[in-house]
Amino acid sequence: MALHGHPVPTRHTTFRGDNSALAAVADPALEHEIVPPLNALAPEPVPPDVAYQLIHDELIVDGSARLNLATFVTTWMEPQARALMAESVDKNMIDKDEYPQTAALENRCIAILADLWHAPESDVATGCSTTGSSEACMLAGMALKRRWRARVGDDPSRRPNLVMGSNVQVCWEKFCNYWEVEARQVPMKGDRYHLDADDAAAYCDENTIGVVAILGSTMDGSYEPVADIAHALDELAASGGPDVPIHVDAASGGMVAPFLDPDLVWDFRLPRVASINTSGHKYGLVYPGVGWAIWRDAAALPEELVFKVNYLGGEMPTFALNFSRPGAEVIAQYYMLFRLGFEGMRAVQQASRDIATTLADEVERMGQFRLISRGDQLPVFAFTTTDDVTDWDVFAVSRGLREHGWQVPAYTFPADRTDLAVLRVVVRHGFSRDLADLFLQDLRDVVSTLTSDTAKAGSSGRSGFHH
């Protein structure tokens, strides 16, 4: 897609039409030379080996997924899991009557997550798989809005709102935009980088459909205090205020906290929590894209939102924004849960947290950086430069690391803290201690180069960097 009127670059690729080796340079003497356009259909088919090689070669310029410390999304799975996905790539998740065992594995995953998150009746869990947390959040938001409308009646003058911190993932802003809900985003204050209990309650009124609490901020990996928020909303309701439900966006933390922080109360143990989502393709350890939405019980999901579709010989309930979608990722999710069990999942997530906290400590010891988070909740930490670093910043570090192959994002925090710019490192399954040591070595090299270049520029009376 060409956005904002920018033209798509045009380029031609040349190959021999007789299935022989690719022509590195166009040769007019080749009788069967074919030059297919890249942005329109070629008049003739391209030989499969040629098509594969050309596209394969183009993709070489992409960054290495294993060195991508920006993404939360899984970049490594066991060969057996990849084999199962390859065997299931042609299965359509929506065709439950045609692929009943794939549907059964989906139901098992829903039951496992409901049990993991302490749903009251996990054996009859209410939930669904999705293409990711964004779709799961949209579904949960729709349920909140529909339940609010049922409580207040059909009064067009009342505009619903949703309370959240300014650190939420963009999917919540999209939900509010698409479904005409006011997004009440609580700004950051000082060194508080996410929603707190007092502000969550203060921003609620009779038109609030729910409060979104984040279990694992994408900004710095920290957990929002879900239990404290629930307690504040309990007190609000007890004092005659609105009775506001909570949705927990546990896109990452939902697959970490149950294993590493079992005493942390954030889930359906809190009666005010109506629904939870997670991303199977993040710390659920599955390639993209799969997500999950689980409701406390059937009453938390308005029945009128669930369609019963007569499709391919059977009646099938469905609650989704998509219809056809791949079943391979759902199968892979069941593989990971079945394969690892509770102790295996705990070990994997603990290994990631150990590497994150160790790496954060080493970064802090370098002296040029100040930690914003330490990787002791999500295996994610954010850091910025210390006050005495004035000649380069986190953006220069990010550029330097990219030259070593590492993808580490540098960005400013949201409104009211745009003065704070950080680097963020996401440690995932497959990021070993050896890779962590290599990253640390490259980070030190980048800082040394920046410091050296600054000193040279100063000695010549020129500066190569300005804020």
Image (tube, grey):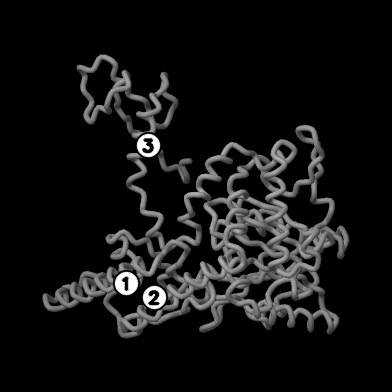
Find residue 158 and report its horizontal and vertical position in percent: 80, 63
Q: Secondary structure at mark 1?
A: helix
Judged left or right of residue 167, residue 39 is left
Q: Secondary structure at mark 3?
A: helix
Find residue 224 and report its image quarter.
Answer: bottom right
Question: Which of the pair 183/87 is nearer the observer?
Answer: 87
Q: Amino acid at mark 1?
A: Leu
Of tags 3 and 2, which is closer to the observer? 2
Q: Which residue is identified by label 2?
A: 359
Q: Which residue is identified by label 3?
A: 55
Find residue 127 and report its horizontal and vertical position in percent: 74, 56
Do we see residue 448 in this rendering? yes
Going from N to C along the chain, the mark reached first, 3 or 2, is 3
Residue furthest to the top in view is: 31
Asked if marks 1 and 2 touch (Cβ < 8 Å), the reply is: yes
The structure residue drawn at horizontal position 21% and vertical position 29%, both measured from the top left corner, is 25
Asked if residue 245 is positioned above or below residue 105 in the image, the reply reads below
Residue 239 is marked as: none
The structure residue drawn at horizontal position 70% and vertical position 70%, both measured from the top left corner, is 211
Residue furthest to the left in view is: 460
Judged left or right of residue 229, residue 48 is left
Find residue 389 and report its image quarter.
Answer: bottom left
Q: Quadrant of the C terminus?
A: bottom left
Q: Amino acid at mark 3?
A: Ile
Going from N to C along the chain, the mark reached first, 1 or 2, is 2
Question: Which of the pair 16/256 is nearer the observer?
Answer: 256
Residue 440 is marked as: 1
Asked if residue 77 is positioned above or below residue 267 in the image, the reply reads above
Count residues near mark 2 (Cα–Cα under 10 Å), then give few for <14, some for 14-19, many for 20+. Answer: many
